[in-house]
Amino acid sequence: MQSLKQQWFGNVRGDILSGIVVALALIPEAIAFSIIAGVDPMVGLYASFCIAVIIAFVGGRPGMISGATGAMALLMVPLVKNHGVEYLLAATILTGVIQILFGVFKVAKVMKFIPNAVMIGFVNALAILIFMAQVPHFIGISTMTYVFVGITLVIVYTLPRFVKVIPAPLVAIVILTAVAIFSGFELRTIGDLGNITKSLPSFLIPNVPFNLETFQIIFPYSLALAIVGLLESLLTAQIVDDMTGTESNKNKEARGQGIANFITGFFGGMAGCAMIGQSVINVKSGGRGRLSALVAGVFLIFLIIVLGDLVVQIPMSVLVGIMIMVSIGTFDWSSFKYLAKAPRTDAIVMLATVVIVVWTHDLSKGVIAGVLLSAIFFVVKISTVKVSKPGSHYIVKGQLFFASTDGFVNYFKSADIKEREIIIDFSNSRIWDDSGVAALVKVKDMLRERDIKTEVIGLDPLSQKIVQQLDGISSSH
Amino acid sequence: MYKHILLAADGSTNAVRAAKEAVKIAGLSNESIIDVVYVADFEKAKSDVLHATSAEALMIERRKKIQNIEQELINSNVSYKVTILHGTPGPEIIKYANEKQVDLVVIGSRGLNGLQEMVIGSVSHKVMKRVHCPALIVK
């Protein structure tokens, strides 16, 4: 891994330029995710500012961008609706504490046990939910709303073919906001949904009673936020690792995400995590070091302080268009090929994850269900033992252990064996424990009673040793 | 004489044809080495990572894409190495070729994506225009 100096100042020019590009792309998302969560745009903007800046110092993956995200915003909806923004800030602080503990106890390792199918389901469900959250803002409002959403989509998808330096969403915002202001069309704006405060965030302690009841309200949300935040952050870290051909410190990243959320909660920001889309934009724009995240955060808050009055005049329909682009970009379009080609059980796990998330509007539930389902499938698969029979040669396929012995024993119990001498071939199998050995011994005894001689071949040395020991015990009585 | 020959590989049949031509040139001298360059496209990074079980598995997946070319080079007994780069295929090949000051770039005329070629022009054309060395475009 690179030295700290290298991580900060190894790519100054590229990091500053990409940081500016990312800041421009961050603003509409931070506002849109605030609207999804049901809070003022400032809660998301302050979150993106604080998290990006703090992660620049304490993160484990230089070049990765973190801020307010859709995955986290979607989890907060019921909390904000039922208890208000102060509880959200308290939950953000608790999320930070949980994530710091995850980092300390090296939970990043557990990520390895989350199957691909679940992660693919996760991003697809996230994309669907982000899209669904836009629907109330453009369906059946006015014809002009449809027109603005449409023009935004045309701009964001065609412009990048010709102009690569300026982010297309920014162009769409500037042009269409100007059109909206000067034409006087009746359009809902960001200002109609909340306020923009043109100041830096300040330290405040969430205004909630500090008692067990508050804790019981926020804890389930904080735990879900901590899990989802970590999941998306570690996935993003893997993507940045791959794009840059470098490695990163996943436990440090988990701890860093925790520190960032912990502090952000005290500065009026909502819980966030790493952002896949923004991190990809950052690396593509030449960002590699910690400086890029710092510049992104600082430039974002600078723009809000300077241009806050203009930001409130951005039509919601333009923001909706940009978020539709974000959801299309989040969706894993190779999933359709995956559904056709992947093992059936994997495809089912992926679909189940998506359905449960879309049903419950809770990403953490989908992930947990997906992991459990694939664990069950795994156990079923691993505990299936098959025996095939070319002649007097019985070939065992599969793992022989406590959960799979029944299938093996039952096969020989019911098998109609004509030969006086058979071979049981274990070259495609392995005996894992005493139960496996006992099953083999049982089968041998059973066949001996039926006057059939057995020869066991293909055992690996370890299994052979256990079999010899136990076989001795059983035949001596 | 061409010592360091860059062969752009993307898993297409054109790239295999390009490999055959590269072999003909490399076979002329014992000092020639073919540098098989595969660019892992930024656009596909997210889906690549999502669908791979681990970073190691992903590396194997990518090596498999150039397996047919490697086989071609092994069969014809020329010395070669494999370089995997990350970025946007065209510009990344150009940057690498110019930085390493390779002596010759060999590239298939058409990659995998026909639609993209129609809209933004072909990668091989861009590469030919912007590398500082001779380029051989194989039909």
Image: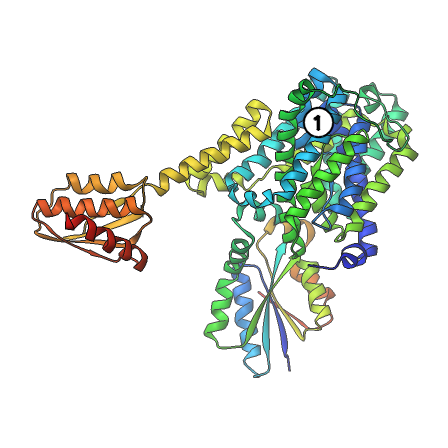
Percent coordinates x, y for residue A20 in the rendering: 83, 45
Residue A433 in view in this figure: yes
Percent coordinates x, y for residue A54 in the rendering: 78, 42
Horizontal relation, residue B106 to residue A415: left or right: right
Q: How many marks?
A: 1
Looking at numbered disc 1 in the image, what kind of residue is underneath it? Ala
* Nearest to the observer: residue B4 or residue B16: B4
At mark 1, the secondary structure is helix
Q: Which residue is mark 1?
A: A91
Relative height, residue B124 to residue A334 (above, below): below
Please identify the residue farthest to the front as the structure is shown: A477
Q: Chain of mark 1?
A: A
Q: How is the rendered protein coloured?
A: rainbow
Q: Quadrant of residue B75?
A: bottom left
The quadrant the N terminus of chain A occupies is: bottom right
Relative height, residue B137 to residue A355 (above, below): below
Percent coordinates x, y for residue A55 in the rendering: 75, 44
* Nearest to the observer: residue A93 or residue A8: A93
Horizontal relation, residue A165 to residue B39: left or right: right
Relative height, residue A59 to residue A361 (above, below): below
Percent coordinates x, y for residue A237 in the rendering: 65, 47
Q: Quadrant of residue A127?
A: top right
Label 1 crowding class (10 Å Cα cut-off): few <14, some 14-19, many 20+? many
Please identify the residue farthest to the right as the structure is shown: A306
* Nearest to the observer: residue A41 or residue A407: A407
Residue plotted at (56% across, 53% down)? B55
Relative height, residue B93 to residue A37 (above, below): below
* Nearest to the observer: residue A66 or residue A249: A249
Residue plotted at (18% across, 48% down)? A474
Residue A348 in view in this figure: no
